[in-house]
Structure formats: C-alpha cells, structure tokens
Amino acid sequence: MVLQLSQKNPHYLEFRGKPIVLIGSGEHYGAVLNQEFDYLTYLDEIARAGLNLTRLFSGTYREIPGSFQIKHNTLAPRRGAYVCPWAQAGSGAGAGEEVYDLKRYSADYFARLKDFLREAERRDVIVELVLFCFYYTDQLWQNSPLWIGNNVNGVGDCSRLQVYRIDKTKLLEFQKKLVQKLAGELNGFDNLYYEIINEPYVLFNGESFLGWQNCMIEALVQAESKLPKKHLIAQNIYNRTFHVESLHPAVSILNFHYALPSAAGANYHLNRPIADDETGFAGQEPLPYRREAWRFMLCGGAIVSHLDYSYTTDHPDGTESDLDQTPGCGGPEMRRQLLVLREFIERFDFVALKPHDEIILNLAYNPNVQIHALGNPGKEYAVYITGGEQVTTELGIPEGTYQVEWIDTVNGALIRRETMNAMPGHAAQNRLVSPRFAEDIALRIVRARS
C-alpha cells in the first residue's frame, strides 16, 4: 500500500497499513544522478542503521565540484558521470559537457532511478523525490540541461531567476512533460513521495514562484488521476519557520529546512505532516542536530531528513571522516543517535499523541531549559528536556498511577525507572526530579494498568 496520510491522525503517515515516522540521515541527494555513487551499499547502510528515509534529486539540477566549497559532494558528479533524465544529443556550449534533447528521455536514467526505488522498497526505505531546485548561481544554471546552451530545443534563454515562471511557456511545457513522465514511470512504487522544488524561497524577498509550483502540482495530479496510485506531494515552505496562510489543496506534507519547533507548532492546525526536511550549518558534532530533531518531533513533527555528508562516492557506506569542509555532520554515531529518537517515538501509540507542552508546570526558572511534550491525556506522554544538568518540574496530568522512565537520548539506555502517583492540586506528588544529565534527556510516562 502506497505511503499515505494516517487515517487516525493526519499529522502522521502510514505505510503498508501501519503508522510510521520518517527519520533519515542521507547523502547530498545525488545517489541516482551521480553514476559513480554505489547506491546499493548506501541503501544497505540506511537499513542497517535502522532508518527509513532518503531524499533524492531528480537530475534537473546538479552542482559542480567545488560548489559551496562542499568536499566530496555527491550532487556534483565528475565529468562524464552525470546521469540525466533527458537523452544526450552532442557536445555542450556551456558549463555542461553535453547537450540534451528535451523531447527524448534517457533509458539509462529511468532504469537507474527505478532500480534505486526498487532496492529502497526492498529495504523499507521511503524516497522523497525532489523534482526541481532553485539555481543559486549563474554557473549552476548554465550547468543545467534546461539552459539554452545545453539543449537542442531552443529553450532556457533566460536568467536563472526566470526559470520557474509560468510566462516562460516553452520552458514550462518541458518541465510539465518531465513531471508527467516521472509520474507515469514511477507510479508502481509505494515507497515514494514528491517534492516540487527545493528552496524556491532562496531570494528571501517573498518570491517563491507559487504560480509555477501550482502548475507543477496540477501537472502531477493530472498525470496520476489516470493511474492506479496517488502519491503524496510535499512543498518546501521556508527555512527555520514560517506561518503558512494558504496552501494548494493537493499538498500533503510541509517541508522546512533547519526547522525550529515553531515550524511544527505554528502550522499544526493545517492537519498535515510537517518535516524538518534538511539540516546543516550547525557544526560537525551530533548534538545540535540531535537536539533539533528531538525538539521538532516532540512539537508535533512527523519527518526528520538529516543531511549526512559522510556518504561519498569513495565511502557510500557513510564512513567518510573528512568532513571539515562540509556544512553539516554525519557518520555512524549520528545515525545511531537518530535511531534512538525513532525507537523512542515508536514505543508509543504515537498517532494518538498531540502537542501538550501545557502539562509542564512550575518549572524552576532556568533560561537555558526547554521542555517539549506530546501526550495522549491520562494515558501516555513523551517529554524532551534540554539545557539543564538537573531539572525539577511539576506535571499537570490527570489523576492516576504512572510508570516513568528516564531515557538517555544518546544511546537509548534506561537511566532510571520510577512510579508517580499523580493527583491534581498536590504539587509534591506531581513533582519529578530528573537524573543529572549533560545536554538532554527524554521522559516516557505511561499510565499503569490497574
């Protein structure tokens, strides 16, 4: 059964009839378009790490070795290693080494893409396929098959800021046809959802090419209307946080990059899964990314897609240790810590949980302490605490006896188990004192069976 919204709680997803949270730690989106990348080894590592998501660029956008000073960038294939959706038609005039015929598609590309999805599905890995990406520089635009110097179809004679406009009608038609082609070729896969475009808001001037995005959404919906399976569509909203005021009705997932907890909280009323779709720019140690993921998920998020630079063409198993020139963190330890988060959430009947930060009462004043909670009132609660060495708090939960477990967020170990006899209005009985902890700690509270 295809990935879809949970029937019990639309803030979450379900796959093959079971509720699922998506937690990934994936390479820099070039697994298919970079022919030198061994995606079988890569997918094996995702499965071994106990994670279940990868993000993938379609190939309409690629980077150049040295782009953004990213070392070992899988999204920047070396000369001759680029696998493109369109068929080659000769030598290029621009930054690209070939020109392409946008009326013909590459059989090798679609074979590789479908094999990637097939192998991911065998390993229970969900694939987010990103159809397009904003061109950050003129050089990147001139490296695209859609640029006029790299195709034989006479389209793409515009600036990089005009690529995603509905008045560029010739270019628009080729973009729509590719979306429809992908929809047809990939319809049989259950482990798939689409994102229309990566970071369309990068100009930060309010322009997100919404008219063009809506056009692509409608092209995708129309193509799938005649096909057996209907896949979810994600929209990349903004970096960090944003209050969404209007949304195309076909959009099911809201993607944020470097997401703050408020990205989930401010948009929870939209009743859609919300994703921390990309992480980065917080150093090369796990703590900032672990903290970002826990805060986000404990505020009602459904998806965390960590960007893991330890996957390279030389180390597709995610063991590259030379990360000094990368804007993020990766490696086996990062993935192990993200698995702790997934396993913690999956111990709950999480589709019954909703944000309930209001259960935290009378927290002793400490400006560094943050606490976020999900709860199914009177039954079970998931709590995440960060910023203190030891925290004392009172919980405003219904009367009853609860089993309390303090969990180490680094390794998932049980630190302490205790019993709490909650009674509203009796502060002493509702008070909890945490074990001492270095950076953060999690709390599982479950009503005891009578």
Image: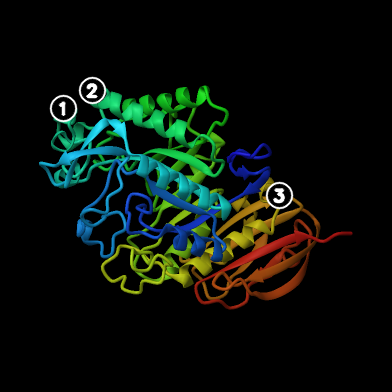
Cβ–Cβ below 8 Å for labels 1 and 2?
yes
Disc on the earlier residue, 1 or 2:
1
Q: Which mark is residue 376?
A: 3
Which residue was labeled with disc 1? Answer: 154
Answer above or below: position of 404 versus 267. Answer: below
Cβ–Cβ below 8 Å for labels 3 and 1?
no
Which residue was labeled with disc 2? Answer: 170
Answer above or below: position of 425 versus 256. Answer: below
Answer above or below: position of 436 versus 151. Answer: below
Q: Residue at 44%, 29% (x, y): give it.
A: 247
Q: Residue at 18%, 37% (x, y): give it.
A: 160
Residue 354 visible somewhere in the drawing: no
Disc on the earlier residue, 3 or 2:
2
Q: Which percent across, then down, holds residue 50?
A: 57, 63
Pair 3/2: label in front:
2
Q: Which percent across, then down, holds residue 418?
A: 75, 72
Helix, strand or loop at label 2? It is: helix
**Which quarter of the figure has residue 94?**
top left
Pair 1/2: label in front:
1
Q: Which mark is residue 102?
A: none
Q: Nearer the viewer, residue 170 or 168?
A: 170
Residue type for callout 2: Lys
Mark 2 neighbour density, 10 Å: few (under 14) some (14–19) many (20 or more): few
Pair 3/1: label in front:
1
Q: Nearer the viewer, residue 237 or 426?
A: 237
Q: Is residue 67 left or right of residue 421?
A: left
Quadrant position of the N terminus in the picture: top right
